[in-house]
Amino acid sequence: MRKRKNIALFVAMIENEISSLICEGALLAAKEMDVNLFILPAGVIGATYDDVEANFYRYQYNTLLSYAQNKDIDAVVMEYGVITSCMAPEDKPNLLKQMGDMPIILIAGEEEGYSSICINNRIGIESAVHHLVRERGCKKIGYVSGPVETSQDAKERLDAYRFAMQENDLQVDESLIAYGNFSEFSDEAVTALLTNHPDVEALVFANDHMAIGGYRAMRKLGLEPGKDILVTGFDDSPIALSLNPRLTSVKSDIKEIAYSAVMSSEDLIEGKEVHRLVDSHLIVRESSNPDVASGLTMTTNNMDELRNVTREQLKEDIYKKFFNIYFENSESLYMKNVYEKYFEYYMHLVNDEGELKFDEQEFLEQYKEFSLIYQKGYVELGQFFAMTYLMQTYLNHIVKKEDDRLILQRAMMASNQVLMDLITRQKSAESDTNKEFEIVLSCVTRDMLQFSKEEKKKYETVITKFQRLNFSSGYLYTY
């Protein structure tokens, strides 16, 4: 019987959106490979925090890095770029040397002699600048950088901004560049930049988190993001969708990076080196184009262009435009099959004579199965509706009778309503679950303090409370 491999995944902070996405991608790969995955939040070494008192004990997370030397661990995957983002470049290699000859692959960071999987920062930042200049007509574009002294990503993204400005025949003005630390506390840097340059038309942020502070700073100055100043970010983290207006961002698919890193662990264990760049691309939202609708600008021109597109071209174009997962695994391939199956079904609702032929119940069932690509998180809701809109518009060009077009439209509206009802019920159930989780966690905290002098009771309370939440197994680690 094959011994299952043990892979240690070191992330910076579990509560961080990027670290959370890394965990998701790594879990996908672990399931695919049938390996044990141990997720350890190692913190950010040498980090300083605005609220010192609240973060006084964060250094304790760093001690978890010592688990990399455990003889039962077969390989290590490390969110290196973030964990070491506050370390001096000359000190970083020492961290890796402490781990001996353990097979290690680095995420979003590189060191000579170590395997790594990194983001292609250049393509993403260049596409953001090209979008602002060529599509939105901006000439004066500011840039909010991460810490270039300690972060490779920050340096590469800043270099890409400078290159893209020159490529568009625009002067690189160093006073238009502000420096943050990749956290949301970029208010001061953005305020200074905009105060010194009140005629700035757009701001490119080196990550999404800094755009949070950027939005605050703009509004304090009486400026509205997306209207008075166009804004882009990087990472396409969940924050990008929660901001108002929704943030145009560069999607680097951090899930893919983590997935690839864990999938490469077998090569590492066999002594092979792995080096890969994962592409990034721009997702345009309201912060840089107020007219954008659900991730796609619908104009009369591109609707007319549908007349000249073959079905196969349309199928391929929709998939490339909207799907959020770019790496292939059993689940993403299944979702691609769900999409292709629905596309073929939908396109054959109209026969060669331009007549609509379909059964309403079958139509609803097919639509429900197709909606899995949204429910499983492969596309956003707005993108899902944009996909169905494009397909419906394409069929409208083929259907000959106006009555048939109305029947199709009513069927789509009814199916959309069924999906929205389902989403509402799911959100209500999730809200109830979250409330229960919060109550149980507060009880754990209370009881841990109450029984602080009774070791057995103190730990028993954790176990019993988590059993209530249907946890089947777990470990307790003491510092």
Image (cartoon, rainbow, N blue to C red):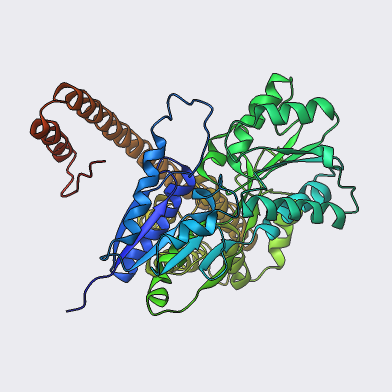
**Image-based side of 221 in relation to 96, left or right:** right
**Image-based side of 226 in relation to 425, left or right:** right
Q: Nearer the viewer, residue 355 or 115?
A: 115
Q: Classify 41 as above or below 461.
A: below
- Of the 4 image quadrants, the one containing the N terminus is bottom left
Q: Position of residue 344 (x, y in %)?
A: 49, 69
Q: Quadrant of residue 214?
A: top right
Q: Position of residue 417 (x, y in %)?
A: 43, 41
What is the count of numbered marks?
A: 0
Q: Classify 294 as above or below 116.
A: above
Identified at 58% across, 49% down, the residue is 235
Q: Nearer the viewer, residue 67 or 211?
A: 67
- Of the 4 image quadrants, the one containing the C terminus is top left
Visible in this render: residue 404? no
Q: Position of residue 430 (x, y in %)?
A: 31, 36
Identified at 77% across, 50% down, the residue is 129
Q: Quadrant of residue 182?
A: top right
Q: Quadrant of residue 160?
A: bottom right
Q: Classify 19 as above or below 96.
A: above
Visible in this render: residue 230? yes
**Image-based side of 275 in relation to 31, left or right:** right
Q: Position of residue 48 (x, y in %)?
A: 53, 34
Identified at 65% across, 60% down, the residue is 397
